[in-house]
Image (cartoon, rainbow, N blue to C red):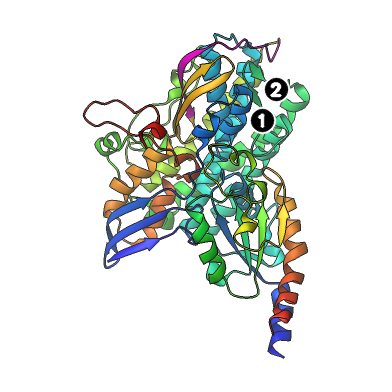
Amino acid sequence: MILPIGPIHPGLKEPLRLKLETEGEKVVKAEIDYGYVHRGIEKIMEGKTWQKGIFLAERVCGICSYEHTQTFAETIEKISDVDVPLRAHFLRVLTNELDRIQSHLLANSTFFKTLDHETLFMQSLDLREPIMDSIELLTGNRVNMGWNVVGGVKMDADDSHFKPILKNLDIVEERLQRYTELFAEGPLIALRSKNVGKMTKEEAIRGRAVGPIGRASGIKHDLRNDHHVYKDYFDFNVIWRKEGDNYARTMNRLDEIPECISLIRQAIENMPKGEVRIKADIKSGYAEWRNEAPRGEVAYMAETNGNLIKHISIRTPSIMNIDSCAKYMLKDVPTVTDAIATYASADPCIACAERVSIVDEKGNSTVKNFYEVV
Amino acid sequence: MLDAIKDVVRKSSIHVCIVNCGGCNGCDVELVALLSPRYDLEQYGIYVHNNPREADVLLLTGAVTEQWIENLRRIYTKAPEPKIVVAVGNCPQSGDVFNQEGGKVHAPASDFIPVDAEIPGCPPRPSEILEAILTVAPGAIASKGRNQK
């Protein structure tokens, strides 16, 4: 029997249709229907100036909105060879890691909710609030921060910002350790999440899974390792696991949070002095930039003509993760309830995913402009 | 008699369904933050059920995309009377940044279904959303219930 779930369903947070093919309770196959939140951001950006483009990039996705503005800014900076001040880079790292912590906590709390573990759900959401306070203190907003500009960041920060942030981090670190233990050693949680929704390394590579979802299946790949600022000034471990089940994915995200906290402390400790923003002189050209968003790799391919954006294409991690979730994780799940939990463990973010690109399977070339083809 | 009791009960028990009809997710994140112990939606008698068939309040987020035009009307008819619709964020009111040349959105949402209250902001703060629901919902549900007879 085919069981449709969504687009509006108590188990889902965002509109998407999940079609589960079931034999009794057992799920044998899953299919996913997209297209409910396609807004055409890339098309809107065409012909706009880069000053306007950054606001649109921020609204690609609300949860990881920060990383999109950073990647957009860095793409334009690469086109026009803008040398961003080091202090701005450090402030970007600081905000980026704060954003990653809140995103991971939110993703985990959604997973706990689908497991019906109300205690951990409430506690991870409560733990997220000090981080949201820190973000608001630093940037002035909770979700869409408007913090990045091409050529640096908008405002400077000083000790009056850093001290409360460090204080909040101490609270988060202490409580997080307790919750991680609660999750790692809970016998009922283990029954519901270990060996459920398994994805092997080969399958993850075939499904092009990225971010914590790929890392939980054994792909040791973190784009922060390749970023020039992280590579030169910061020291962190790439967290990865071998199991590839729901437990591993959630644990991977929980284990990444202490790394983020240590990165923030390094950033505040070694914060260089100087300017935070320089005047950018924008040139024409084409550039590509990739960054590690909370969910995986975000890529921006942009072509500018003077101040105007001629063409832009955005590649977000969610689409690959949701796809590999449907193809590999959901193919052998014992019950329908576990299928919802497996779906939540893949950290789906539909607002990111609604983008169109056509891949030529034989020629391996991506069609540049979708609207020309249609 | 029964309606009078229902009116009293409805004031302190509000079921909410979140309908994301094509936004950036930011408002949805703030709605999830409302569930956290700091804001604690449930102590005001509000329960996020996410099932339109049992909802008293539909929380609309997002500019209305092509796919949602028909589905929005269908979801609205599925919700039982009395119902109120609260538009959260700029998107259902004006389309925000998406309502430009090239965008595939059909804002405002009030073109398709009647909207009772609007909360501007991109996204609005959780406390603002909570205040709006509490100001509008209990009275509106009770009075709509009476007008139905």
Image coordinates of residue A374 in percent, x first then y, are 37, 37
- In this view, the residue farthest toward the bottom is B1
The residue pinned by badge 1 equals A146
**Image quadrant assignment for residue A334:** bottom left
Marks 2 and 1, the one that precedes in the sequence: 1
Q: Position of residue B36 (x, y in %)?
A: 64, 53
Nearest the viewer among A139 and B82 is B82
Q: Which residues are magenta?
A: A275-292
- Judging from the image, mark 2 belongs to the subunit labelled A
Magenta stretch encompasses residue A277: yes
Q: Residue at the location (60% across, 38% down)?
A: B100
Q: Secondary structure at mark 2?
A: loop
- Classify residue A243 as left or right of residue A316: left
Q: Secondary structure at mark 1?
A: loop
Coordinates of residue B32 in the picture (x, y in percent)? 60, 52
Q: Tags 2 and 1 in contact by the CB under 8 Å rule?
A: yes
Q: What's the CA distance linking mark 2 and mark 1?
A: 8 Å
Indicate which disc residue B24 carries: none
Residue A128 drawn in magenta: no
Question: Does residue B57 appear left or right of residue A364 in this picture?
Answer: right
Say which amino acid is labelled 2.
Lys
- Where does label 2 land, which residue? A154
x, y percent for residue B22: 54, 48
Q: Amino acid at mark 1?
A: Gly
Assign the N terminus of chain A to one quadrant of the image: bottom left
Placement of B95 over or under A23, stated as above or below: above
